[in-house]
Amino acid sequence: MELLWQLLVNGVILGSEYALLGVSWGIIFHITGTFHFAHGAVFSVGAYSAIFFSNVLGWPLLPAAMAGITVAVIVGMAMERFAYAPMRRIGATPMTVLITSLGMLIILQNVFPILFGSASRTFPDVNIIPIELGSAFLTNVLLYKVIAAWGLFGAVMAFLYYTRPGKALRAVGSNPEMAQVVGFNIGNIYLLAYAIGSALAAVAGVLQTMDTGASPANGTFAVIIASMSVLLGGMGSLTGSALGGFFIGMAMSLSIWKLPSEWQLTVGFGLLIILITVRPRGFLGGKLTKTEV
Amino acid sequence: MEYIFQIGIFVAIFAILAGSYNLLIGYSGLFSLAHAAFFGLGAYGTALLTSPESDLVSTPWPIWLGMLVAVVFTALTGLIIAVPALRVSADYLVVLSFGFQMVVVGVFLNWIQITKGESGITGVQRPTLLGMELNSSGTFLIYAILLTLLVYYLLWRVTGTPYGRMLKAIRDDQIAAESLGKRVVRSKIEIFCYASGIAGLAGAMFAQYVRVVSPASFLLDVSVEILAMLILGGTANILGSLVGAAVLTVLPELLRFLDVGSGHSEQVRLIVFGALLILILRFRPEGLLPEYWRPAWLRRRQERAVADDLAELRQGPLVLPPEVLGTTAKTGRPAIMMEVEDAVRSFGGIRALNGFSTTLETGRITALIGPNGAGKTTAFNLITGFLAPDSGRILLAGLDITNTKPHLLAGLGVARSFQNLRLFYQMTVLDNVMVGIPGQKGERLAWATVAMGPTWKEERQTRRMALQILRYVGLEERALTLAENLSYAEEKLLVLARMLAMQADLLLLDEPASGLDPNSLDAMYAMIRQLAEGGKTICIIEHNLDVIKELAHKIVFLDEGRAFAEGSTESLLKNPELAARYFGNA
């Protein structure tokens, strides 16, 4: 039973981490419709930039993390502004945009090992404090993950529902043509979506670096988890993306109860396949209708 | 020499991979990120079944049998992601294939009892070819070339036949393909498994050549490399994949001689591949060999065949082929082709149709009119199976067709057009019409692959029929033009031609006359009248009163989701209440 309790606690932590990833990718996907693979690279840019500011320039952890997140936001927005937006203007197919995104992911994910080495890197001065929760153990960093995930999710939802720019984002997400007619600047709103999504991804990247360290392949894994979470949560629902991520994380953690940990991803993926078969529109997705005839 | 043979073998392996990937990305518009995983499944399958060092089988299987089983197994594995994803949308396939790629490599790494983890399986046997041992790279190259030829033959049978044309139609516009009676989901799943199986065959060959399979050979990066080859070569052009694979296999080898010695050669290679992908898509998205590129002699042969057919057709009168008259022309037409009884359909809280009833009489032109939002398009979608009614019945020639899927209705003789036309814009005018002709045996994968002679024979008849229809609507000179290069009036004519090709009894035309200049308008009127006289049942949605006066025998006036008034054109147009409601000149 003690193992189960520990796994549940771990599940909440992993689930929160994945929920954050799901929301970070979901806000971009739901609003712009772009299959943003390069999001995985943005995740890594956040982590490695923070490492650069901390380890190379010797900044304290918090300012280094903030600077890292800022760099990631700039990179994410630059991808939209200089890669996706020009392609949309010339009427590129979604497949072309998707392949471009994949190209950017591959390029950046191979730049990091050249710059930072293939081994896992972490910050020099993370102060890890163990915390006891009944018979389960966790650390302060893991607690930050949970707090950051749900705090940021709440902040994003509040932003989307209670502020003018947030409402504009939702309007564009649900009906871009109409929003354009009403006078929204689609380009700027898309940029905003990339800024928010990139910031959230970078937070996840920095927190992961504090916990287990950054390595080059983490970004690709992050975007896989993020897109799986969004699919499971349902198209068009950000709350769904968070729940989808939480569910996958929890399921992967609980699978350790009976299976070796290497099979976590297989279990998560298997569950996704089963759930998508039973409920194609995901947890909270709107009714799947055929493309308007 | 050994080194050059080795490069040749890798060109062959990648040519097979790029060609099969092209089936998905170029021909079917399906984006999968798991091609390397299927490559790996074929390799591991072959190794596990035929290597003496395998822990899966106690005695190794005969090599050819092991290979065959591995390939079939790989193809069937494709079902795991294709079925759940493609039932819903191609977006789902992107995510599921991405996850599948990771899971498969995870299984290779972690199922240590069987796959031996990171070090992989060694001692894979090479087959013998006609008694020849394939011990050297030179002899193996012969085997590799033979397999590549076999695969490219199969790819050609898939893409250069009615089957490939159907795939492209589904790629260009899934809804239009459905309205033509194509089985969209089934075809997508089928081609996904087929392409996966071919990737598995490349894996089998790879395993036999390097004699050891380990997870590192089948990572996501490999899919990216194959993708770069196929994009460079040109999407939806099989020869392009061959060229792309050759260029991108040979070029890095040449660059190896000027190695910068950074110690990061693998990373640099992938950065170059990634950059290449982006640059090609930016500056030459069609690749080296564009979709409709083919060697000059082949192109000339096709042009000549079309010209010959047309010359022969021009000898005869300007009529439609007899098949186009429709199925009931032979069996005797019912007096009433379609009845809608009390159809109700709501969207959210809004009742788009609220007890709509009407009849469409055979050989008559019925106009569906009414204000915006009256439910005209909903009525069309209901009749053609794109929407199911909440309640009510729909009868086609007395047969209850409520809740029948669009592709089945197409087979029963219902043809429709769309307000936004939905042509297959990346296909030629001729292909747009040919794909509409029902009952082509060559649209079945197995038939197109095996029955070469009969497929060509059928294809000649199909082409002739399509050209005759094109001549009827006056587009025969544009037969080999891409649909995207037509003028709007020509597009409208092509829409009609594609519907005629379906040999349907009931034609549902959504604003056939809008946007036409006076000349084309007269031609369109004449054709629609002639079709009705020939026995077709026609229903049009129209806003333009002139068109209605010219064409319609009967008007059904829709308002608030029901037939508010119904009657002959003359009587209805004199009705003052109607005039007030619709034209606002009370």
Image: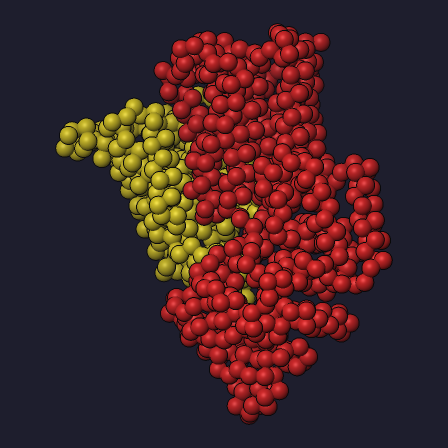
Image hue for chain A = yellow
Which quadrant does the N terminus of chain A fall into?
A: top left
Q: In this view, does B312 lie above or below B230?
A: below
The answer to whether residue B292 of the structure is visible from this angle is yes
**Which residue is at the front of the view, B311 or B286?**
B311
Question: Can you give x and y, in whole percent of width and height, for residue B261 in the image?
Answer: 62, 15
Q: Residue at x 36, y 30 (%)?
A: A266
Question: Can you give x and y, in whole percent of width and height, for residue B82 in the image?
Answer: 47, 39
User: For this view, does B480 lie left or right of residue B388?
Assistant: right
Q: Residue at x 48, y 47 (%)?
A: B89
Image hue for chain B = red
Residue B289 position by quadrant: top right
**Which residue is at the front of the view, A119 or A256?**
A256
Q: In this view, does B99 lie above or below B321?
A: above
Q: In this view, does B453 lie above or below A29?
A: above
**Which residue is at the front of the view, B3 or B284?**
B3
Q: Which residue is drawn at 63% across and 28% down?
A: B151
Question: Can you give x and y, in whole percent of width and height, for residue B466 in the image?
Answer: 72, 54
User: For this view, does A258 lie left or right of residue A33?
Assistant: left
| Colour setup of the view | by chain
**Which residue is at the front of the view, A173 or B333?**
B333
